[in-house]
Amino acid sequence: MEYFIQQLINGVTLGSIYGLIAIGYTMVYGIIGMINFAHGDIFMIGAFLSLIAFLVLGIVGITWIPLALLLVLLVSMLIASIYGWTVERLAYRPLRGSFRLAPLISAIGMSIFLQNYVQLLQGARVRPIPPVISGGFTFLEGGIFSITVSYLQIVIVLLTIILMTAFALLISRTSLGRAQRGCEQDRTMSALLGINVDRTISLTFVMGAALAAVAGMLFVLYYGVIDFYIGFLAGIKAFTAAVLGGIGSLPGAMLGGLLIGLIETFWSAYFTIEYKDVAAFAILVLVLIFRPTGLLGRPEIEKV
């Protein structure tokens, strides 16, 4: 039981990171009906920005952990938001009136460009970072297996809950959220009613990129090593989480992220680690067979 609880804690922590990335996928899909395949690479850029910011703060002598985390979070979110805005302007807006495959191909090209861009700037070697947040709580010591909850895991889960709540309130109770929901239902009618559709879509990309940067910072803190390729695998898993929970649903994206994290963690703990990705995708296929719209997704009803 102690081992099970420990893996449950690890799975929730990993799933929280996947969930933050998945929200960016589902927000973009909810408005323009397309998948931003460069989103995983924005997450990777956010991770590198966080690593660089931590190193710079260490050089200038800012070592108080809460202040350092806040500064790194703000810097990585700001710069990653600029990348997200640029992706929308270059890869999506010029092709918005084209056939549906054109923006998809453009986004894949942008993803490849960002991977090679970071590889040229930072190199292909793994970039390590020393532990920033250490320590934690240990329960049931002296038994066969002790349960450990690190301070970092608590920070990850709490930050995820705060951001999820903030974005849910933003979408449900602000003018920007109403504009986003209007564009999701009918962009033409929204434009006729005075909503700036281009600005709304750009802000959605910016918000998704900011969340991806948060996930990138948490990934750096949790694993301590990154490279230019982490965006591909994390992006595919976060996209899987968004589909599993119901693409277009914010709660569904977070639920899907938690499920993917739990599946990977428990499969690695009780079975062979080499097939943890196979297990996650197999469960996705099973869910979609019986619920094609995902766990919390709603079927699209076309009114005539």
Image (tube, rainbow, N blue to C red):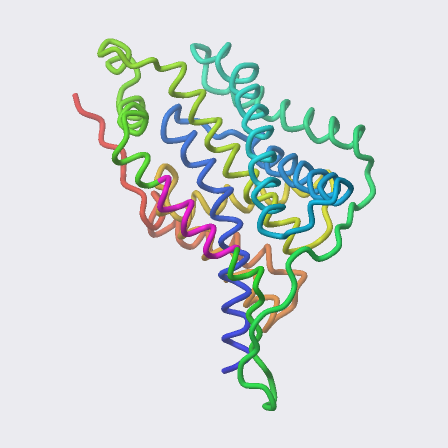
Residue 7 location in percent, x, y? 54, 70
Q: Count of labels shown? A: 0
Where residue 28 appears, as percent x and y from the top left, is 43, 29
| Spot occupied by residue 284 in the image (x, y as percentages of width and height) | 46, 52
Q: Is residue 158 magenta?
A: yes
- Above or below residue 103? Residue 23 is below
Secondary structure mostly taken by the magenta-highlighted segment of the chain = helix
Residue at 37% across, 26% down = 31
| Foreground of the two, 77 or 267 | 77
Give the residue drawn at x 71%, y 57%.
131
Q: Quadrant of residue 135?
A: bottom right
Task: Looking at this view, name the residue that lies furthest to the left.
Answer: 304
**Does residue 158 appear to the left or right of 146 in the view shown?**
left
Q: Can residue 229 be found in the magenta stretch?
A: no
Q: Residue at x 31, y 48 (%)?
A: 296
Q: Is residue 216 above or below residue 304?
A: below
Q: Is residue 11 above or below residue 22?
A: below
- Give the vertical position of 187 relative to 14 (above or below): above
Q: Determine whether, in the image, residue 37 is placed left or right of residue 99.
A: right
Q: Residue at x 79, y 29 (%)?
A: 121
Q: Write down the region rendered in magenta.
A: 156-167
Query: Which quadrant is the C terminus positioned in?
Result: top left
Q: Nearer the viewer, residue 261 or 147?
A: 147
Q: Position of residue 83 (x, y in %)?
A: 59, 25
